[in-house]
Image (cartoon, rainbow, N blue to C red):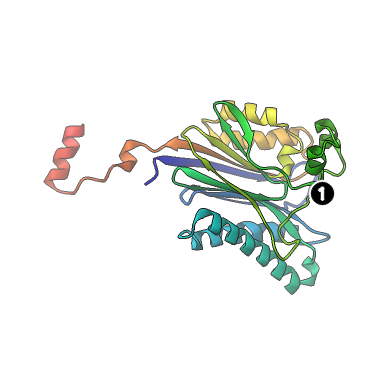
Amino acid sequence: MSRLALEIAARSDLGRVRTFNEDSFVADAERGVAAVADGMAEQHGADVAARLATTTLLQSLLAGQNLAPRAATHAAFASANRAIIERARAEPALRGMGATLALAWFRGDRVAIAHVGDSRVYRWRAAGLERLTTDHSFVQSQLAAGNMTSHEARVSRSRQIVTRALGADEQVAPDLAEHEVLAGDVYLLCTDGLHDLVDDADIGAALEVLAPNVELAANTLVTMANDRGGRDNVSVVVIRVDRRRAEERAPQPPPGLLGWLRAKMRA
C-alpha cells in the first residue's frame, strides 16, 4: 500500500456570462484519478464532448491498470478521442465537437500528468507554484516564438484558439510526464475559465494559504475567477497529498483474546 493518501475537492461553475456548462471533471481519490475537460463545438455538443472525454478516460484507465502508466495513459486518451469522433459521426448535429483534457493519475509515489489543449495541471510545493503542462494553443506558440509578450497573450482575442484537442483528428498525442509525489504536495487541475482570469501568482498564493482545506481552496479559486468577470465556465480539482496514518497501514489484529490484549497494550 502507498505511504501517501489523497484528499480531493472538485468544483465546476457556470461563471457570470455562460448559460450552459461545457466543462466536465472526474475526481476519484480512492483510484487516484483526477481530470478536467473543456468542451468545444461549432454549434452543439461541447458538453457532450467534455463528458465523453472524462468518462471514457476513467473507464479506460481502470481497465488498463495492469499496463505501464505511459501505455495506459496513451490508450485512455486514444479511447476518449475515438469516443468523441464516433459520437459525432453518429449524430450529425454534434459534428465538429471536441474537448481539451488534463489528467493527473496517482500510482504509489508517482503521478502521471497528461494533457491535450489548454486545460492545465499545476503543483504547489514548498518552493512555490509550478505549471506542469504547456498549453496547446495559438497564444502559447506565439509566446514560445517570442512574437507575443505575456501581457499581450493575456488580452489577445486569439487566446481561445487551441492547436490540439480530442475529436479534431483520428490520432491524438497527449503530452505526458511522470513526477515524484511528496507528502504536502498540492495539485490543481483547471480549465481556462480559471487561468484566463487569475494569474499564476494569485493561484499560487491561494493554494499556499488554503492548502490545508481543499474544499475551501476549490471554492475560493472559483470565486476568484467569477470576481474577475467569470467570462467562461470554470472547473477546478484540488488534490492534497498527505502521509497515510500509521494505523491505516498497519494490519488489523486478529479477533479474540489476542486482539483484545493488543488493544489493551496500545491503550
Judge left or right: residue 146 versus residue 135.
Answer: right
Nearer to the camera, 4 or 22: 4
Residue shown at 72%/44% (left/top)?
135
Nearer to the camera, 252 or 168: 168
Which residue is the site of mark 1? 161
Quarter location, residue 58 = bottom right
SS class, disc 1: loop
Judge left or right: residue 113 versus residue 15.
Answer: left
Judge left or right: residue 83 versus residue 250.
Answer: right
> Residue 110 location, x and y as percent?
49, 44
Residue shown at 73%/53% (left/top)?
22
Q: Residues within 10 Å of mark 1 (few under 14, many from 20)?
A: some
Residue shown at 45%/42% (left/top)?
109
> Residue 79 location, x and y as percent?
62, 64
> Residue 34 location, x and y as percent?
56, 48
Nearer to the camera, 55 or 77: 77
Name the quarter where the C terminus is drawn: top left
Residue shown at 62%/31% (left/top)?
129
